[in-house]
Amino acid sequence: MARKKSKKVKYKYEKAIISFFVFLLTTFIFVNKPYKNILNKKENETKNLSNEYHVEINEEVVLKEYTKNKRDINSISYDDYANLNLSKKKIESILEYKEYMGQINEIKELENIPYISSDDLSKISKVFKDASYKKYKRHNINKMTKKELKYLGLSNYDIKKIISYRKKYKIKNLIELEKIIGNKYNLKNIEF
């Protein structure tokens, strides 16, 4: 008797599983058809619109217009960078750098920002020019983070040397800083 019950239960489970799969298949086959028809109609409508108006957007024309009238690197906005096809992360990094440093004096400075490549710099230099006048916002080297030290153009090795020195002592002047990292950097925007 127990075997008959287990066979009946097994049969019911098999029947339920098969009917479930049949339900799924019919759902995908018949429900997706109307959506495909709707998508095809929309696609045809857009084709008709594009054929009707013959509108063509030429990105090169827009870029040429920008390159004729190069603008100051500090007068640019988020949208200007987005027009250069820079990623959101790169744009935010550049704007953060600009805010921290006070301004961007030369396009070459952007090399100090992580993730900015030489290709990005060439895109930017086609459209924008260096600052008309140079201004330096001063920062205390004893309080700067690793990222902020990187903004100054310091190498990772020199940044580590500065950070380890700061753990023991306070950097008091430029002479002391030059003893730590040498005089290979033009550090106009630091204070002690």
Image (tube, helix red, strand yellow):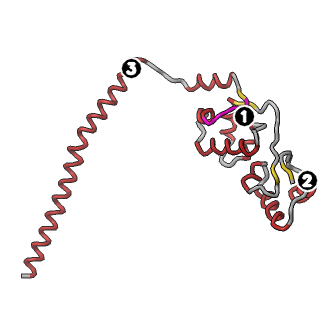
What's the magenta region? 72-78
Q: Nearer the viewer, mark 2 or mark 3?
A: 2
Q: Judge the density around disc 2: few (<14), some (14-19), many (≥20) Cα neighbours within 10 Å.
A: some
Disc 2 marks a residue whose amino acid type is: Leu
Q: Secondary structure at mark 1?
A: helix
Q: Nearer the viewer, mark 1 or mark 3?
A: 1
Task: Report the Cα–Cα distance between label 1 and label 3.
Answer: 41 Å
Q: Position of residue 93 (x, y in %)?
A: 66, 45
Quarter of the rendering containing residue 181: bottom right
Find disc 2 in the rendering and name its residue. 174
Give left or right: position of 45 versus 132. Answer: left
Instruction: Say whether residue 159 is magenta.
Output: no
Give left or right: position of 125 versus 3. Answer: right
Disc 1 marks a residue whose amino acid type is: Asn
Disc 3 marks a residue whose amino acid type is: Asn
- Looking at this rendering, what residue extends furthest in the bottom direction? 1
Residue for point 72% across, 53% down: 147
Find disc 3 in the rendering and name its residue. 51
Residue for point 54% across, 24% down: 58
Task: Report the Cα–Cα distance between label 2 and label 3.
Answer: 67 Å
Residue for point 81% across, 61% down: 161
Vertical arrangement, residue 11 with respect to residue 56, above or below: below
The first of marks 1 and 3 along the sequence is 3
Instruction: Give the label on residue 26, or none.
Output: none
Find disc 1 in the rendering and name its residue. 74
Vertical arrangement, residue 26 with respect to residue 168, above or below: above
Q: Secondary structure at mark 2?
A: helix
Vertical arrangement, residue 165 with respect to residue 102, above or below: below
